[in-house]
Amino acid sequence: MPWAEPSSRFTALFEALAIEWLKAASQKAVAGLLKLSWDEIHGIMERAVQRGLERRKAELVSQIGVDEKAFRKGHSYLTLADDLIRGRVLYVAEDRKQNSLDGFWETLTAEQISGIEAIAMDMWDPYIASVREHVPQGDGKIVFDKFHVAQHRGDAVDKIRRKENKTLKAAGDDRLAGTRYDWLRNPTSMEPKDRKNFAELRKSELKTARAWALKETAMTLYSYIYERPARKTSAGGTAGQ
């Protein structure tokens, strides 16, 4: 029909309405409200996505985010690549294997790949391998997200605490008994009494206290904007190890 795109039986205005509603609700919900079948509403969505892709130019994308998204029940995942500057999804693929992300690099030009400055991701080995294989100097452009870095550092502190607690208890010293979560919490969220007791522990000569201090110093790096002061803090932390 002259007022519709190929394979569509709806006006552009009606499809625009459906797309606006799809931004706030599921395909099933919008189909029910507009009295359409799931296939019809899915077709509207697919045509809108295709129009958007056709309008997209081969722009430079300096900062990319790579993440996995769980869906359905069980271990079903999608791999997503995002433009962190413009806040938009660039690529979606099934699963979270290396070849799931490999396909993304094929959608970029050589100029776009060389223009990548940073790739934020978690510490998932298949994603790391994909970046190393397809992005020049990829290792130097990977930025591990703060949550996973903090998790690994917290696990390291707890590992030291468990080992040291075992040694201390054998000598009749129970200072570290029951303190597992104290080393993981923010001291400012503690009750005054607990905060005072924890302050005594973290100022002690214990290996756990030293590991905790190194972890806290490392996490302050995320608050820096400029490289020089961050390197100065990092060097100071290394010298104190």
Image (spheres, rainbow, N blue to C red):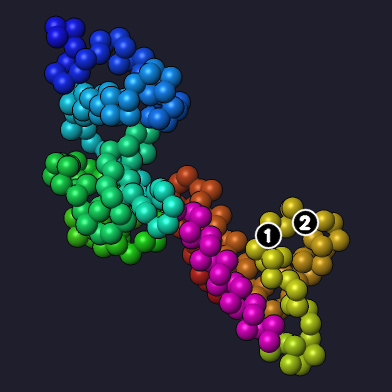
Does 26 sit left or right of 200 as displayed?
Answer: left
**Mark 2 — residue?**
190
> Where is residue 184 shown, x and y percent of the image?
65, 63
**Residue 7 falls left or right of residue 165:** left
Magenta span includes 49: no
Residue at the spot 22% in from the left edge and 57% down from the top edge: 99
Instruction: Classify residue 130 by image quadrant.
Output: bottom left
Residue range of the region highlighted in magenta in the rendering = 145-166
Query: Looking at the image, is 130 positioned above or below residue 94?
Result: below
* Helix, strand or loop under label 1: loop
At mark 2, the secondary structure is loop
Q: Residue at x 48, y 60 (%)?
A: 149
Q: Is residue 136 visible?
A: no
Instruction: Of the two numbered discs 2 and 1 on the same chain, state the one appearing first in sequence.
Output: 1
Q: Which residue is mark 1?
A: 185
Q: Is residue 147 visible?
A: yes
Image location (x, y in percent) of residue 167: 68, 89
Q: Residue furthest bottom?
A: 171
